[in-house]
Amino acid sequence: TIAGFISPALCDWLVQRARPQMARAETLNKSDGGQRLEDIRTGSAMNFNILRSDMLLLILRARMAAATGLTTSGMEPSAVLHYAPGQECRPHFDFLDPRLPAYGAEVANR
């Protein structure tokens, strides 16, 4: 945790940008590498893909990379998540199994 890493104003800005495009959060589909709905994740999400990103988000991602010593190319897309009371993200494993064809190329590239 890095206290004060992102200002409240920038947090609010990200939420406002995401709010109109929030939709039910999805998980990775192991069979084809795509997305799917699952009962383990019932909140909503908006992912900032390359078309939805802008300079402020790119600067924030660069700061995150510098703070962790990692590269931005290894990061997942930035996202805003929302969980209302009663919604949940149950425990699960988040990893890409390189033995599965849908993930082999992605693991090799990163």
Image (cartoon, rainbow, N blue to C red):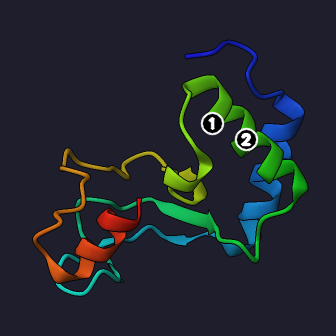
**What distance separates the C-alpha of mark 1 from that of mark 2?**
5 Å
Observer-nearest of 76 and 72:
72
Residue extending furthest toward the left: 99
Q: Is residue 68 above or below residue 53?
A: above
The N terminus: image quadrant: top right
Q: Residue furthest front?
A: 108
Residue indicated by mark 2:
62
**Callouts 1 and 2 close, C-beta under 8 Å:** yes
Give the SS element for disc 2: helix
> Which quadrant would the C terminus be assigned to in this image?
bottom left
Q: Is residue 47 above or below residue 5?
A: below
Residue drawn at x 36%, y 48% is 86
Name the disc covering residue 65, or none: 1
Q: Amino acid at mark 2?
A: Ala
Q: Relative to 63, say whether 83 is above or below.
A: below
Mark 1 neighbour density, 10 Å: few (under 14) some (14–19) many (20 or more): some
Q: Residues within 10 Å of mark 2 (few under 14, many from 20)?
A: some
Q: Residue at x 89, y 35 (%)?
A: 9
Residue 68 lies, in percent from the top left, at: 55, 26
- Residue 92 percent coordinates (x, y): 18, 50
